[in-house]
Amino acid sequence: PSALLRLDPARVVAPVSRRTFGSFVEHMGRCVYTGIFEPTHPTADADGFRQDVLALTRELGVTVVRYPGGNFVSGYRWEDGIGPVADRPVRRDLAWRSLESNEVGIDEFMRWAGKAGVEVMYALNLGTRGVQEALDVHEYLNQPDRTRLAELRRANGADKPYGIRMFCLGNEMDGTWQLGHKTAGEYGRLAVETARALRAADPDVELVVCGSSGSSMPTFASWEAEVLEHAYDEVDAISAHAYYEPVDGDVGSFLASAVDMDHVIDSVIATADSVGARRKSSKRLNISFDEWNVWYLRRFMAERDTASTEWPFAPRVIEDCYTVTDAVVVGNLLISLLRHSDRVTAACQAQLVNVIAPIRSEPGGPAWRQTIFHPFAITARLARGTVLRVELEAPTYQTDRYGEVPLLDAVATHDTGTGDVTIFVVNRHQTDAVTLSAPLAGFGGGLRVAEAWTVADDDPSATNTAEHPDRVVPRPAGHAEVTGGALHATLPAQSWTAIRLA
Ligand code: AHR
């Protein structure tokens, strides 16, 4: 099969938002303990952070990290995690039925974020807590001095306020599994009151209200509409969450997961804009797609021991081992996020280390890159400048879940400073390569392939493991060249490819 990609430098979607390359650290499983933090590890620094994981985090190109949850946050008392470590309480984490030692709290995490060079997106507990606790943690984090909590932070070693800008008003409050789950009306009221209070303290905060925890929720879209009837004027963004997995071996549908992500984004935008229209508001809300990834959720649900009476510390929870096919899907989800850069201004892959993560680490042992690490790292490095709207003429195929879908999906970025154009493209065909042509006349000639990377393999089920950490790595894409004023590339079956033209 062959396909044609049309690109035009004038067809700009929006600037690439660096916050698109966000990640997520939740106090869950081994994301924090033996993930980012392991004082006894041979690579641990003076603060107990694993430097091997820090190096991989930087290489991944992560820009912003959501913290400290997730479902965890809805039962979390932030003040348990400050002050002398020896005095901190051990608590039950009801979300993941484990023990939380509180050895890592906000001050430690901010130190880690500084070393990783990432912004922090702080999630507030609106499950078991409310307006006052949100104000308290904000005061601890952002008030310069003189107040009780600002002075407490300074006494704890952080003289300057952290200046956190983004706050999530709770997590997945539509889910019955959420501690303190609420109806849309109850949550909308709490969200708007919390938002007003935070803005009174700090007009510069950027507030993310909870959208649905997934598009399969029965209240999807009506939840957003009702919550925004309360909170529209007070918030900057609404969250979206989506996880994908192959169901009953249906790889064709799985490879088309980005079709669903496009639909989720379009639906949330339509719903938010319709509330805005009813309010006669000129304000437009953005989406913070602050949980997305491939997650073998059905396996997790089937294996979960709901009768357990144990309270383990940092247990192995959803340490999914990712395949080449998963990496292609992750690359495609990034394409979907980028193409919506006019409205999706932040996104967090869930999560960073061990828990459904691009980075894996063993206690006392190595850290390595999962297959899904590679499309993320390359996209974060190469997506520069503005996002271009592209048009694809490609064959289609039939899926059980999404009907007829295109074989290819693509997006491009254009850095007007350097002139670089980068094309990100997936081939969803399970067995056949597709040849791609992209005329480049609009860019004035002279563009050549500067670098081209493909993630694909003769065995799409191949994975990276502690023993074989580099079984799957990006390979220089063969057959990508500019001739006759057009890019010509051959895209292997089930592949994700990035081609930078300079
Ligand atoms: O990322 C894992 C979990 O998925 C998060 O804790 C929760 O918000 C979502 O349901």
Image: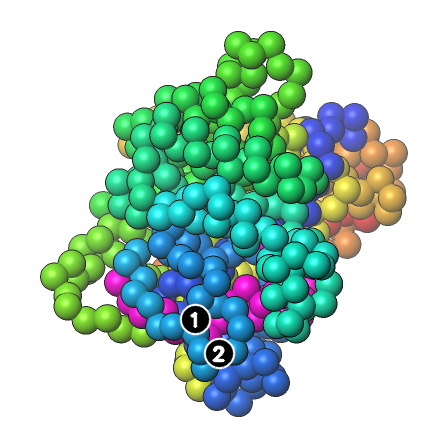
Amino acid type of the residue tagged 2 in the rendering: Val
Of the pair 362 and 444, the residue shown nearer to us: 362
The tag on residue 85 is 2
- The residue under label 1 is 102
Horizontal and vertical percent position of residue 144: 72, 57
> Against 281, is 239 above or below?
below
Residue 28 among those drawn in magenta: no
Q: Which residues are magenta?
A: 97-120
The answer to whether residue 422 shows anywhere in this view is yes
Q: Earlier in the sequence, mark 1 or mark 2?
A: 2
Of the pair 80 and 389, the residue shown nearer to us: 80
Q: CA distance from mark 1 to mark 2?
A: 8 Å
Q: Residue at x 32, y 74 (%)?
A: 313
Q: Which element is circle 2 on? A: helix
Q: Residue at x 32, y 62 (%)?
A: 93
Horizontal and vertical percent position of residue 392: 59, 29
Residue 108 among those drawn in magenta: yes
Horizontal and vertical percent position of residue 253: 35, 38
Q: Residue at x 58, y 29 (%)?
A: 234
Horizontal and vertical percent position of residue 193: 50, 33
Of the pair 267 and 119, the residue shown nearer to us: 119
